[in-house]
């Protein structure tokens, strides 16, 4: 086992911050964390770019950042008088919780934790350690490094290649998505998932009252959570191929309702993904993923109510359609689209198009200098499905030649090729906690503490 006195973490969002906190909780090593957006430190994209109206998708009771202290967030929320365990807190509130944890650990850890507001632009793994080059020119050397880069930004869609703002916005989290819009402007959101939901709420929150159209091939939008209920016990892991998942879900849904049936699969999803063959995983992504996403990643009831009100007022419409072409027309864009099941193409004149298709997973399209260099050198490689970075079960990056990098780890959503269910807090908190124990050699948690 490697002797680790100093670990470097690249990325200070939820995954990187929680890895740092867990490393410091579990051992006596030094940690250096590098985050390029100083204002997102501790919060990352999800909790650092959130607007006031953005609400968590998971009840407070299941949002503890520490798997060994399940009530940690609910207790913090109650003590801050911001909600109860059954409520859906704001994402900004959750960001404040993460920052409070980081501040607390920083105060206790003192010079064992160094936080650098900088960007890692290169990283080399050497026989005796890791050498990280930062944009400022600073070099950080450590025994091991963990990449916690979050998702890659969405890719440019072919129909919109070369088009720029204000008519086409590729970053749905940009602060200016509602800027300079007129009351009768029409907005097109590409995508109907959680990102499109966020965008519709941001536009509404910014006072935009014009029509918004959200489209995707199937026109599927996330479902709402139901009332808080304890999931009835007794759900077994479905055996056999992934198609067994659908059968098992249908059968169990009849007894306990589809929400409970989906939630009961949660403990098994990662194991089922690992057990599936490459072809089964591919088939799942091609055919089942859109349905899985809208049933599994649900929205808070109050968010669903807001969207329903916007739809009732015809300020929000959802289309099942495909964009074939987009042309600048002086006022914005004329978008050519084909509705699902129809042969003819229709034209839609819109003031602005916002790309809400979700994050890019394919490493080969990454523009990030660090990931580009690591990929080009073969220190990391895409997973077989090209939905993230290839890792083994212990989060070691897999090099192009197939060997596991002993000094380089990857955590967070970019490890979805190996684990699939590794996007939400309940899964990432377990991943980084387990990795921290691995790196520090901790064997139990009872004696932990700074
Ligand atoms: C909008 C949104 C809402 C969500 N809502 C929920 C929810 O309600 N409940 C839930 O359980 N999960 C939710 N999730 C999922 C989950 O919480 C996130 O996936 C998780 O926060 C991922 O954190 P991360 O640190 O891996 O990535 P990020 O938050 O993206 O953080 C990565 C950080 O790394 C930095 N970085 C990257 N490269 C470098 C570099 N080279 N040098 C320096 N810094 C770098 C970036 O600046 C960024 O701050 C949500 C996700 C999103 C995107």
Image (tube, helix red, strand yellow):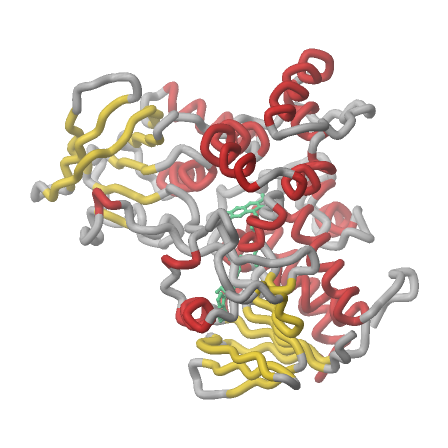
Give the image location of residue 390, x and y in percent: 55, 57
The quarter of the picture where residue 231 lies is top right
From this viewpoint, is residue 298 visible?
yes
Q: Quadrant of residue 353?
A: top left
Residue lying farthest top? 254
Q: Nearer the viewer, residue 46 or 78?
A: 46
Q: Where residue 151 sits: x, y (%)?
A: 48, 55
**Foreground residue, 339 or 96?**
339
The single residue placed furthest to the left in the displayed view is 330
Q: Is residue 41 left or right of residue 216?
A: right
Q: Tell me which image quadrant ligand 1 sits in.
A: bottom right
Residue 338: percent from left, percent from top:
23, 25
Q: Decide which of 371, 93 is in the foreground and name it.
A: 371
Q: Residue at 74% x, 65% y: name it.
A: 436
Is residue 230 among the parts visible in the rendering?
A: no
Relative to 129, does residue 372 appear above or below in the rendering?
above
Total numbered circles: 0
Q: Residue at x 79, y 68 (%)?
A: 25
Quadrant (top left/top right/bottom left/bottom right) for the N terminus: bottom right
x, y percent for residue 404: 63, 66
Instruction: Pick out the residue farthest to the front.
Output: 401
Location of residue 266 with respect to 234 vertically, above or below: below
* Left or right of 24 in this view: 167: left
Question: Where 198 sits versus 33, above or below?
Answer: above
Quadrant location of the C terminus in the rendered image: bottom right
Q: Quadrant of residue 276?
A: top right
At 36% from the left and 64% from the top, the residue drawn is: 367
Tell me the residue at 57%/85% (across/down): 140
Front in this rendered view, residue 47 or 21: 21
């Amino acid at each position: 086992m490697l002797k680790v006195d100093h670990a470097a973490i690249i990325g200070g969002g939820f995954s990187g911050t929680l890895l740092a906190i867990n490393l410091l909780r579990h051992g006596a090593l030094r940690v250096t964390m590098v985050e390029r957006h100083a204002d997102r430190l501790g919060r990352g994209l999800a909790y650092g770019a959130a607007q006031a109206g953005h609400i968590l998708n998971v009840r407070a009771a299941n949002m503890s950042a520490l798997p060994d202290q399940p009530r940690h967030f609910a207790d913090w929320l109650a003590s801050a008088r911001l909600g109860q365990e059954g409520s859906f807190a704001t994402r900004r509130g959750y960001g404040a919780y993460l920052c409070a944890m980081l501040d607390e650990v920083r105060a206790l850890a003192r010079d064992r934790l160094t936080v650098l507001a900088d960007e890692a632009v290169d990283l080399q793994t050497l026989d005796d350690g890791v050498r990280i080059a930062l944009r400022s020119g600073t070099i950080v050397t450590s025994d091991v490094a963990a990449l916690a880069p979050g998702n890659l930004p969405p890719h440019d869609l072919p129909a919109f290649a070369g088009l720029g703002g204000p008519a086409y916005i590729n970053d749905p989290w940009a602060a200016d998505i509602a800027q300079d819009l007129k009351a009768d402007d029409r907005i097109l959101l590409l995508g109907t998932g959680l990102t499109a939901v966020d965008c519709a709420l941001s536009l509404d929150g910014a006072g935009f009252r014009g029509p918004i159209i959200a489209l995707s091939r199937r026109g599927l939008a996330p479902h709402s959570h139901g009332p808080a209920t304890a999931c009835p016990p007794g759900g077994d892991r479905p055996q056999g191929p992934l198609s067994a998942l659908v059968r098992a879900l249908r059968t169990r849904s009849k007894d306990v309702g589809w929400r409970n049936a989906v939630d009961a699969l949660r403990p098994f999803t990662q194991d089922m993904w690992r057990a599936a063959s490459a072809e089964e995983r591919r088939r799942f992504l091609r055919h089942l993923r859109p349905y899985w996403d809208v049933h599994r990643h649900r929205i808070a009831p109050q968010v669903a109510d807001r969207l329903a009100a916007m739809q009732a007022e015809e300020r929000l419409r959802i289309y099942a359609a495909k964009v074939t072409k987009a042309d600048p027309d002086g006022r914005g864009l004329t978008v050519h689209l084909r509705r699902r099941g129809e042969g003819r193409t229709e034209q839609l004149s819109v003031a602005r198009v916002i790309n809400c298709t979700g994050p890019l997973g394919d490493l080969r399209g990454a523009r990030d200098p660090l990931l580009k260099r690591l990929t080009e050198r073969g220190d990391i490689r895409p997973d077989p499905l090209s939905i993230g970075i290839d890792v083994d079960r212990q989060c070691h990056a897999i090099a192009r030649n197939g060997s596991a990098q002993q000094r380089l780890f990857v955590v967070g959503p970019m490890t979805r090729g190996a684990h699939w269910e590794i996007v939400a807090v309940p899964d990432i908190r377990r991943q980084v906690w387990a990795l921290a124990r691995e790196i520090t050699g901790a064997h139990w948690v009872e004696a932990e503490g700074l």
